[in-house]
Every structure is written in structure tokens, then in C-alpha cells.
């Protein structure tokens, strides 16, 4: 711990998973900890990200299952948008107080206000100086907004999830996680959805053939895609909003979602004042999550990194910093295999070596492919879509997996330990899963 010359041993700016997963056990060990937060405690994921999104998506999952079992289960299902949003609010509404209670239960000071550096050991919280031996920047990301005429007419993901009434016609600009997940939800709830993107494909970080399965399914359900369309302006015309592009493209809609990405919260926190190095992708850190200023660290999505900017990554980084500050380790951070998932229907999930990487290096990898509807267990629920590819090294260790299916997220979670710990045939043979289950089905392919 630090000497008493500072108010705190560790002060975090931001209260999301990049902070609280490590700050709570650190404070429980006797360290004096403070967290500065200008918004809702818990940051993006609990309040306007993962938790809200998966709640809104739950009826979509049920709707898809019902479709697959049509004829065995009779009737019809429709999503009540207002009640779905109200349910989302019920689920996430208490999370800030819950997280705040956890913080305060171990003696963490929660400082409400905007934090910015005065010097390397001092943070001004709405003008009031607070000092700390170590400072952690965990300010996360915020929605990118197109810098075009009429940009103020578009909305962001938080506003979408709080819509009191679902618009009849919805234009979504972008083709990443948020764009396709919200296109899925809105389409399932009855909106006419058009996805407009400047590129020639969606979800560029995922396997192209698997992405196409998701896109094809959305198109079959009525979602329109406008690829290679660079939006130049948004305009108000009577009761509609018009999306315009340079090639003469025009699209009238009732609501526009700008889902063109998320960018790091690096503005107005005094980084230049203390010479912390950063770029457009975030704060630059070394292999100990330390910035170029020795006592200043960063955690979570605000870091410029190659690892996925996801909640699990932020949790791992926050926990690592706890171990580092508490003297439990001096080693550099060693990231585990971090899975990614797009919560469309079907889901698209992956971990480890990608099919594209494996195909380009047949000397070191082999690929096994499976068509999901061929698996007897998937036939129980009459799943109609899905494929996976399992990547093995030459010793038949599982080193990567990608799947598109209704249960892809559960499959990748099941396979994750094998990828992380490089299980070979002997280790895999020791794993006995509940039967029948999605886990026994997934491991039956190894």
C-alpha cells in the first residue's frame, strides 16, 4: 500500500467492469480505493449494453424456437415492444444501486462527478482535488456518430433500447455487432428494417461464410441490406427521415440508428495535461496495463489493444490489476482465450484460431466442419440453420472453434476450457458431460 501522503492507494476513473471486478476485492484486502463516476454506476454493460440487450433479445429466442417447432406447438407468438422494454427496465433498473452497494460494503468511496487530471497523482472531481498513489483509467467507449449534415437526426444504441414505441420503418447505419443485433430484435418485433453500410460485408471480424448465414436469414425475414453505400446526410422530410448517399441512394424511415461503431472516452479527462500517450484507438499501455506514466494504468475498452473490447476482457484486466496492486503478481498480463459472440438469431460465436487462419496454414492446422441440423440433439428442437468449424493443431489439441447456430454461445462456452488449456485426446476423454445436453453434443464432435 502507499504511504499516507495520498488520499487513496488506488483511484479509478469510471465504474464499469474494467473497474469494479478488481476494485472490490482490492478494497476488501485493506487498500483505500475510490471510484469516480459521472453517470450510472456500473458503466455501459449493466446499464445500456449487454444486460439490456440480452433482455430485449429473450423474446426473440423464444419466437425462433416456436418457429422451429411449428406444427408440434400450435398458435402464434408476437412481441409486445412496450412490455419488452418495460421488462428490460425492471431487469436492469436496480443494477446501479446493487453495484454501488457492493462498492460501499468494502469501504470504496464513490465520487460522483466528472474526473480529470490535474497532475499524475491528482484528479479533479468537479473541481475538487483527490490524490492517489495509483490511478486507473477505465472510461470505456461511447457511440461513434457520423460527422455528416443532419447527424443530430440520428440516434444511438441507448436511445434504441429505450424506445417507448417501435418505429414502423427503421434505418440502421453500420453492420457490426450493434447493427445486426438490433436489426434482429427490431425485425422480430415487427419493424421494417434496412441496414445501410459503406462496406461490402457485415461483421468483418467474423468468418465470412458464417456471417452470410446470418445475413441470409435476416433477408429471408424481410430485413433489407444496402452494401457499398456511403451515407452522406440525414434529412427531415415531412413525417419521415431520409438517409442519403453519394450514389443517389435515398431511404425514407421513421427512425435512424447510427450504429457505426464505438470510440474510446479519452476526451476531457486531462490526458494531455499529464502526457499520457493515446491514439484514436485508445490509451496505450504496456504488458502490465501501465501507461507511459508509471503510476497511471488503464483497464477495459478504453485501451488500444488487439484483444476483443468486450466485458470478459475488461473483467480479466480489472482482476489482473487487483493482483498486480496487491503484490500477488509481478508478471505481465497473459490473456486467455477470449470468446466473442454476436447475439443475432442464429448466434455467431468464436474462440481461438479462426477458420481463415487455419485454412491459410494447413501445415499446422486441420479443420473439421459440421452441419448443425445433422446432429441428433439439434433435431430435438428442429434447428434448421447452423454450421461449425473446429480447428486442431497437429497433436489434435483443439485450438479454435467457430459456430453459427441458435446455441452457438453455449457451444463455444463448453469448448472454451479445451481451447484455453490445450486439451488433447487424453484430457478430452476425462470429461463426462450431462447427457443429453448441448455440452455433450458439442464434445461429441471432438
Image (spheres, rainbow, N blue to C red):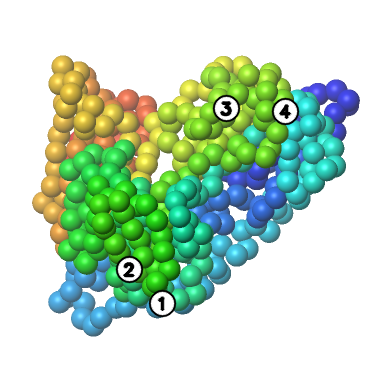
Q: Residue at x 78, y 27 (%)?
A: 119
Question: Where on the picture, by quarter, is residue 173?
Answer: bottom left
Q: Secondary structure at mark 4?
A: loop
Q: Position of residue 170 (x, y in %)?
A: 35, 67
The residue identified by callout 2 is 252
Vertical relation: 335 (above or below) 116: above
Q: Which mark is residue 239?
A: 1
Q: Which residue is mark 3?
A: 278
User: Mark 3 near mark 1, Cβ–Cβ under 8 Å?
Assistant: no
In 3D space, how far apart are the residues under numbered discs 1 and 4 (Cα atoms)?
Answer: 47 Å
Residue 367 image label: none
Comes first in the chain, label 3 or label 4 = 4
Mark count: 4
Label 3 packing within 10 angstroms: few (<14), some (14-19), many (20+): some
Residue 42's x, y, as percent? 62, 50
Q: Is residue 2 visible?
A: yes
Q: Earlier in the sequence, mark 4 or mark 2?
A: 2
Q: Are marks 4 and 2 in contact (CB under 8 Å)?
A: no
Find residue 241 and report its image quarter. Answer: bottom left
Q: Is 126 left, or right, of 60 in this rendering?
A: right
Going from N to C along the chain, the mark reached first, 1 or 4, is: 1
Could you say whether the residue bearing mark 1 is in a helix, strand or loop?
Answer: loop
Instruction: For marks 2 and 1, give the CA distance.
Output: 10 Å
How much space separates mark 3 and mark 2, taking CA atoms?
A: 39 Å
Q: Which residue is mark 4?
A: 273
Query: Which callout, 2 or 1, points at the residue further toward the start of the chain?
Result: 1
Mark toward the viewer: 4 or 2: 2
Q: Which of the two discs, 3 and 1, labels the residue nearer the N terminus?
A: 1
Image quadrant in which you'd find residue 425:
top left
Within 10 Å of disc 1 (Cα), the crowding (few <14, some 14-19, many 20+) is few
Image quarter hosting the C terminus: top left
Local secondary structure at mark 2: strand
Amino acid at each position: 500500500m502507499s504511504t499516507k501522503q495520498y488520499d487513496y492507494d488506488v483511484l479509478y476513473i469510471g465504474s464499469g467492469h474494467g473497474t469494479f471486478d478488481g476494485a472490490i476485492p482490492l478494497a476488501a484486502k485493506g487498500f483505500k480505493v475510490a471510484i469516480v463516476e459521472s453517470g450510472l454506476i456500473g458503466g455501459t454493460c449493466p446499464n445500456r449494453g449487454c444486460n439490456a440487450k440480452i433482455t430485449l433479445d429473450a423474446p426473440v429466442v423464444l419466437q425462433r424456437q416456436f418457429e422451429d417447432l411449428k406444427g408440434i406447438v400450435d398458435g402464434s407468438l408476437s412481441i409486445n415492444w412496450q412490455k419488452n422494454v418495460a421488462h428490460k427496465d425492471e431487469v436492469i433498473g436496480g443494477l446501479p444501486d446493487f453495484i454501488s452497494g457492493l462498492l460501499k460494503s468494502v469501504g470504496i468511496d464513490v465520487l460522483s462527478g466528472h474526473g480529470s487530471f490535474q497532475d499524475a497523482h491528482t484528479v479533479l472531481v468537479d473541481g475538487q482535488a483527490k490524490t492517489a498513489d495509483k490511478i486507473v483509467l477505465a472510461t470505456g467507449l461511447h457511440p461513434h456518430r457520423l460527422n455528416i449534415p443532419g447527424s443530430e437526426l440520428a440516434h444511438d444504441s441507448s436511445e434504441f433500447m429505450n424506445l417507448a414505441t417501435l418505429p414502423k420503418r427503421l434505418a440502421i447505419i453500420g453492420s457490426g455487432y450493434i447493427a445486426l443485433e438490433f436489426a434482429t430484435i427490431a425485425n422480430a418485433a415487427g419493424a421494417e428494417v434496412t441496414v445501410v453500410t459503406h462496406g461490402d460485408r457485415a461483421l468483418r471480424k467474423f468468418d465470412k461464410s458464417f456471417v452470410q448465414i446470418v445475413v441470409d436469414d435476416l433477408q429471408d425475414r424481410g430485413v433489407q441490406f444496402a452494401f457499398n453505400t456511403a451515407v452522406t446526410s440525414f434529412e427531415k422530410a415531412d413525417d419521415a427521415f431520409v438517409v442519403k448517399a453519394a450514389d443517389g441512394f435515398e431511404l425514407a424511415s421513421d427512425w435512424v440508428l447510427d450504429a457505426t461503431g464505438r470510440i474510446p472516452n479519452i476526451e476531457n479527462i486531462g490526458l494531455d495535461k499529464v502526457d499520457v500517450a493515446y491514439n484514436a484507438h485508445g490509451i496505450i499501455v504496456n504488458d502490465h496495463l501501465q501507461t507511459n506514466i508509471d503510476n497511471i494504468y488503464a483497464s477495459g475498452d478504453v485501451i488500444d489493444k488487439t484483444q476483443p473490447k468486450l466485458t470478459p476482457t475488461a473483467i480479466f484486466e480489472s482482476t489482473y490489476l487487483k493482483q498486480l496492486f496487491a503484490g500477488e503478481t509481478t508478471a505481465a498480463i497473459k490473456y486467455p482465450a477470449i470468446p466473442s459472440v454476436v447475439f443475432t438469431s442464429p448466434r455467431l460465436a468464436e474462440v481461438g484460431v479462426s477458420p481463415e487462419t487455419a485454412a491459410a496454414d494447413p501445415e499446422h492446422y486441420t479443420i473439421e466442419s459440421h452441419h448443425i441440423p445433422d446432429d441428433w440433439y439439434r433435431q430435438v428442437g428442429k434447428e434448421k440453420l447452423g454450421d461449425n468449424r473446429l480447428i486442431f493443431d497437429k497433436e489434435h489439441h483443439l485450438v479454435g472453434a467457430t459456430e453459427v447456430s441458435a446455441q452457438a454461445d453455449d457451444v463455444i462456452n463448453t469448448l472454451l476450457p479445451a481451447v484455453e488449456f490445450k486439451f488433447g485426446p487424453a484430457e478430452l476423454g476425462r470429461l463426462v458431460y450431462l447427457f443429453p445436453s448441448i455440452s455433450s453434443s458439442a464434445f461429441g464432435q471432438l
